Amino acid sequence: MNFASDNTAGCAPDIMAALARANAGPAGAYGNDAATKRLTGHFSELFETEVQVFPVATGTAANSLSLSTLVPPYGGVICLDQAHIHEDECGAPEFFSGGARIFNVPGKRGKLDAADVERVVKLNSAANFHRMQPAAVSVTQLGEGGELYSPDEIGAIGEAAKRHGLGLHMDGARFANAVAGINCRPADVTWRAGVDILSFGATKNGAWAAEAIVVFKPELARSLLYRRQRAGHTFSKMRFLSVQLEAYLAQDLWLRNARHANGMMSRIAEALVELPDVRLLDRPRGNLTFVNLPVYLVEPLAKAGFVFYHWGNANYHTARLVTAFNTELGQVKKFVSILRKHSRGRKPPFAMDFLPRP
Ligand SMILES: Cc1ncc(COP(=O)(O)O)c(C=O)c1O
């Protein structure tokens, strides 16, 4: 019973089956196989425009390599404080770009906006060669706190980026959950809104290990072949990454999986808002949310074997809950029933502000 991360989920059966099929007989190496060759067509159809696709095995590689195409060594990436590229990639974007800086900003309600872009650009003017030069903006969709950007919000950031000649990257480790949450066409929230390059995640939502760098601006693709090889992410048996992505897109598995995960999170949230001694950060739009729970609710959950990230003090904890493509309804019901059983039916006698991640 695990709400710790969608990374704790296994691999979707259709993707496992595709891997098993790909195991029969030889196939060309280093992307010279039929499945890899088909990917451009699949993704171009999905995004309703010609794209270039580069499979890699991790989200960190997808983000860092994408950003390295947009940012020179003396450049910088504008993103939120909480962005995975800033907090959780051990400097990989800086490393792959040859030294770029992350311009991390606090953001508003867990989102970046056009004013943040303007402010960072103004502070680091092109006329001042002493300063690192902002060269790209990176937004996470779905956000690290479960936030969802509408196509208009991305569009406003995209316009600000273009006004100053910056590229726009989207960290879509949970892109499927975001598209399912907005219920929009993938194109509307990416290239039509100004996104130049997308880390299209699949691993968290049912792949074994596969992410696609989707390039909307053809000139960015040119260097990626070399950058990916230099980063050690050109898999010799690339077919095994490509068939995962192919199966992920087939019959909209990516969206079906995400809708399921989001639906399970909605069920949890609907129950939580009814409990006066629980505080939900926001209505979840995807498969991830944060909630404050008094210790007297955390304890019975832990005792029942529920696993999730939480941190706190003697009175209450902030918990991050994440559902996945294979979260079972029974798990959700059990989680909720434990909370209902141990709820004291009134607000706790202490304030429950959200605690910063340790
Ligand atoms: C928002 C976001 N981006 C990128 C990643 C990177 O994924 P990986 O761990 O595969 O490098 C993660 C993983 O947790 C993530 O949550």
Image (cartoon, rainbow, N blue to C red):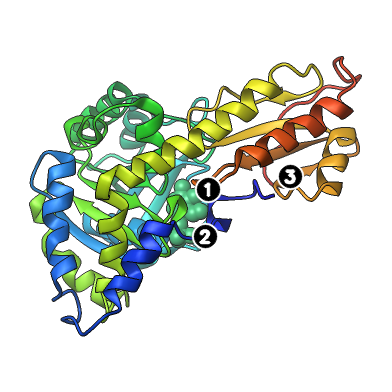
**Of the residues tagged 2 and 3, which is closer to the observer?**
2
Q: Residue at x 87, y 40 (%)?
A: 300
Which residue is more in the foreground, 121 or 80?
80
Q: Residue at x 52, y 25 (%)?
A: 109
Looking at the image, how many numbered discs can be counted on the residues?
3
Q: Is residue 290 left or right of residue 205?
A: right
Which residue is more in the foreground, 194 or 281?
281
Mark 1 touching mark 2, by CB under 8 A?
A: yes
Tell me which corner region of the image, top left, top right, bottom left or bottom right, holds residue 280. top right
Q: Is residue 304 above or below residue 318?
A: below
Q: Which of the two labelled residues, at mark 2 and mark 3, occupies the earlier sequence position?
A: 2
Q: Which of the two labelled residues, at mark 1 and mark 2, occupies the earlier sequence position?
A: 2
Please tell me the numbered disc located at residue 19.
Answer: none
Residue type at tag 2:
Gly
Residue type at tag 1:
Asn
Q: Residue at x 79, y 25 (%)?
A: 352
Q: Residue 240: where, in percent of width, then height?
A: 30, 72
Q: Is residue 58 left or right of residue 282?
A: left
Please tell me the numbered disc located at residue 326.
Answer: 1
SS class of the residue under badge 3?
strand
Q: Is residue 75 above or below residue 146?
A: below
SS class of the residue under badge 2?
loop
Q: How far is disc 1 from disc 2 in space, using C-alphas?
A: 8 Å
Residue type at tag 3:
His
Q: How far is disc 2 from disc 3 in space, using C-alphas?
A: 22 Å
Judging by the rendered image, the residue that carries numbered circle 2 is 10
Q: Residue 65: where, in percent of width, then height?
A: 29, 62
Q: Is residue 152 above or below residue 46?
A: above
Can you tell me whether the CB of the residue at mark 1 lies under 8 Å from the nearest atom of ligand 1?
A: no
Q: Which of the two labelled residues, at mark 3 and mark 1, occupies the earlier sequence position?
A: 3
